Image: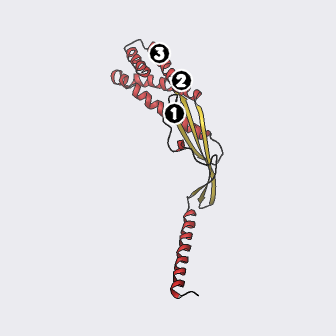
Amino acid sequence: MFQKSQFRTVAVLSCLIASLFASACQDDMRIGSEVIVESSRRRAPKWIKQVPKQSLRYYYFVGKDSSYQQTDRYAYQDALSNLSAYLSTRSTSLYKKIEETHGLEEAKVLRKTYIQNLSRASISGAIKKDVYWEKVEKLTREGIKPFYRYYVLLAIRKKALRDSEARTLREQSTENRTTLKHELEAIQERLAD
């Protein structure tokens, strides 16, 4: 038979275990909490949290989207948007000297043409390297709402990007036979290194 001290110990431990179990269940039941109920793989790929570093052949971009539809279309568009942001940043640094010496308007026109040509070439040459999706259930005040979270890994060939850059700069250099020609050729030389 149980002695009083043993009975109290068992009762306290039982209450403690029950309260821990109840708080764990309560954590799972909070409004806004999410549970992954299905996914395209057992483990999520590393690239969804950290974009892969550029390789010898490719630049990589990741797109993400959450939707009630089971499609990667918007995640793919998000990856293209990230590519476009990269090209915009790259063009700003390339055309900085022209902006400083010839003014903002001249550099803006050249940079815009550069971005348009490279974007067109990059989008047509974009390679969908990988797709990962999760079906998620989220607890809301109205109940459980399922949705999909999609990730797309996009790759752009470095050689194709360099070729498109060189072609665009040659065209701009040919069109601008003034002092800009020398600066555009200097940009070409920098890219060739």
Question: Looking at the image, is mark 3 or mark 1 earlier in the sequence?
Answer: 1
Q: Are marks 3 and 2 in contact (CB under 8 Å)?
A: no
Q: Which residue is mark 1?
A: 83
Residue at the image position 53 percent from the left and 84 percent from the top: 6
- Residue 91 in the image, given as x and y percentages of width and height: 44, 27
Local packing at callout 2 (Cα closer than 10 Å; few below 14, some 14-19, many 20+) is some
In the image, is residue 117 above or below residue 72?
A: above
Residue that lies at the very extreme toward the front in this rendered image: 1
Residue at the image position 42 percent from the left and 25 percent from the top: 108
Local packing at callout 1 (Cα closer than 10 Å; few below 14, some 14-19, many 20+) is many
Quadrant where the N terminus is found in the figure: bottom right
Q: Which residue is mark 2?
A: 160
Quadrant where the C terminus is found in the figure: top left
Residue at the image position 56 percent from the left and 61 percent from the top: 31
Closest to the observer, 170 or 50: 50
Local packing at callout 3 (Cα closer than 10 Å; few below 14, some 14-19, many 20+) is some
In the image, is residue 176 above or below residue 65?
A: above
Q: Which residue is mark 3?
A: 170
Identify the amino acid type marked 1.
Leu
Closest to the observer, 5 or 177: 5
